[in-house]
Image (cartoon, helix red, strand yellow):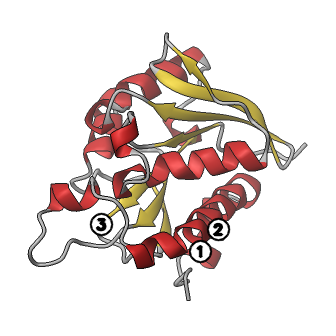
Amino acid sequence: MPESAISLIVGLGNPGAKYDATRHNVGFLAVDELASVYNIRLEFKNRFEAFLGRGGIEGIHTTLAKPLAYMNRSGIPTQRIAAYYRISSQEILVVHDDVDLDYGRIKIKEKGGHGGHNGLKSLIDALGNGDFTRLRIGIGRPGVRQEMTGHVLGKFHTDEQARLGDLIRRSREAVVSILCHGAKESMNVFNRKDLLT
């Protein structure tokens, strides 16, 4: 079995039907895609306030999680999961939306601050550091007449929706690459591409 530095993959988003398929929830979509492709059953675990699934991805034993405490409180469930399974911050991969990347771009980053992202801020506060790896999924910035909250909580435009499947598929491929080859090697492949061209 291959060894991986990553034990826990956390997708960020907001719970509830009204947030389904919104830009802020691409982290949830990526985890759902991983669970579907690798036949990992996600179940609600009340003790963690999260959907949780454990299984194999390319022979690597992995835990998938979708915290359900809303974006700005997602660090609390993540910290509970990490503490329960004795997973360090360095063994966590967080998949999240990023307005500073154009729609369709993804970028892998090791460690760092929150960059104004409420989910990352909550994680850093709860874990006590920002030493986790991130997969940033670009959702672009709002137009001149749209405020930021409306943009990130809004549904994808028709042209974005048409390309969303490809974006989530490539995000899944990036996660698998990080698991199998590590973040640094995966950066050389995924950080340089406009994935939707």
Asked if the residue at tag 1 contacts the one at tag 2, i.e. Cβ–Cβ closer than 8 Å, the answer is yes
Query: Is 150 above or below relative to 20?
Result: below
Quarter of the image for residue 86 reads top right
Q: Quadrant of the N terminus?
A: top right
User: Residue at coordinates 55% horizontally, 69% vertically from top-left?
Assistant: 167
Position of 119 with respect to 32 (left or right) is left
According to the picture, the residue beneath numbered tag 1 turns out to be 190
Amino acid, disc 2 = Ser
Nearer to the camera, 102 or 151: 151
- Would residue 173 be seen by someone viewing this image from the given angle? yes
Nearer to the camera, 131 or 28: 28
Q: Earlier in the sequence, mark 3 or mark 1?
A: 3
User: Residue at coordinates 36% horizontally, 32% vertically from top-left?
Assistant: 74
Answer few, some or many: residues within 10 Å of disc 2's Cα (few below 14, many 20 plus, some between 14 and 19): many
Amino acid, disc 1 = Phe
Query: Which secondary structure, mark 3?
Result: loop
Query: Which secondary structure, mark 1?
Result: helix
Q: Of the numbered discs in the image, which one, if any, rests on residue 160?
A: none
CA gap between label 3 and label 1 equals 18 Å
Position of 128 with respect to 84 (left or right) is left
Which mark is in front, 2 or 3?
Answer: 3
According to the picture, the residue beneath numbered tag 3 turns out to be 99
Answer few, some or many: residues within 10 Å of disc 3's Cα (few below 14, many 20 plus, some between 14 and 19): some
Query: Is 15 above or below relative to 77?
Result: below
